[in-house]
Image: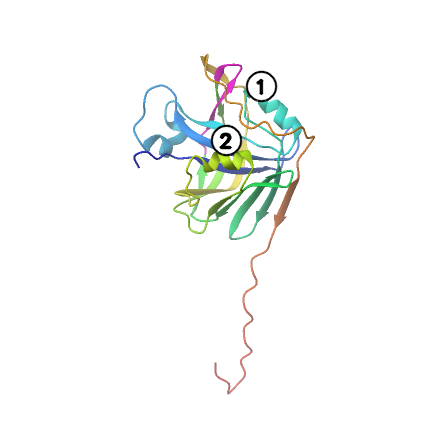
Amino acid sequence: TPGRGLIYIGCFNYLDTSVGPYGEVAVVVPAVYGRRPPPVLPSIFEGRWPGFGGVILHLPVTTRLTRDGGRVYWGYAKFVADMRFQSTPEFHQCRLDEGGRHIFTLRVVKRGPPLPDRRPLITYSVKDGALVRTTIPQSALVRMALGGGGSSLELGDSHPVAMSIRELGIDPRPVMTRSNLDRSAILPEGEVVEQGVRPLEGYLGVEREEGELVTTHLPMAAPPPVPEVRAGASI
């Protein structure tokens, strides 16, 4: 709507990578580099729209190695945080904290038919005054649905990252949700598309070797017991 835009918030629990397992949370503003685009359409086509990508506002991770690599080579706004992932047959949930301070909790209800998605994931970041575009090939099986349907975002009270998101005037009810059933991707080197841009370092956090990473899988809630039916009885 006029005066309103989109923001993407995604949580990734990487099980198998070249630098070991770790968690990552992305707070991203979708944008188009170059010519001014029409409304809505770039966010539908995403990586297939010329110049489309996500500007990385915050990218917390659970290890110092992935934080340092992301900041040094791509200029990603990374810091070390704590993540608790929870998965049930009904929803995915991620709670993001730093040193006991709640940043946010994102819950995504599993809705929509499973569909393949091979569109590249494209990011924009700033490194040493240069705008860097990184095109990440990926292959995923994803469930997508319009509307909230029980999905939600709960922001913390005092953490700088939570406050920066709240200041955007974000609606805690999503206009669209996406949950990956499976996903693989390769992070290549980025390309410099412009020089002399403003810095975008994001929140730096405190020095930590690693954050907490907890994953919990819960079974579906047990159905109510079925009453025993005997001959001559009625229910």
Q: Is residue 28 left or right of residue 71?
A: left
Residue 150 magenta: no
Q: Which of marks 1 and 2 is nearer the N terminus?
A: 1
Look at the image and tell me whether residue 9 can be seen.
yes
In the rendered structure, which amino acid carries the disc numbered 2? Answer: Gln
In the image, is 79 to the left or to the right of 150?
right
Crowding at mark 1 (Cα within 10 Å: few <14, some 14-19, many 20+) = few
Q: Which residue is disc 2 drawn over? A: 138
Indicate whether 106 appears above or below 130: below
Residue at (39, 43) in percent of width and height: 175
Please tell me in which quadrant of the rendered image residue 54 appears. Answer: top left
Tag count? 2
Pinpoint residue 160: horizontal percent, then vertical percent: 54, 34
Q: In which quarter of the image is the N terminus?
A: top left
In the depicted structure, whether residue 32 falls above or below residue 234: above
Residues drawn in magenta: 118-131
Residue position for label 1: 73
Question: Which residue occupies 45% across, 33% down?
Answer: 118
Q: Where is residue 4 in the image (x, y as percent from the top left)?
A: 35, 35
Q: Is residue 47 visible?
A: no
- Give coordinates of residue 47: x percent, y percent: 41, 28
Kindly give the residue lying farthest to the front in the view shown.
Answer: 158
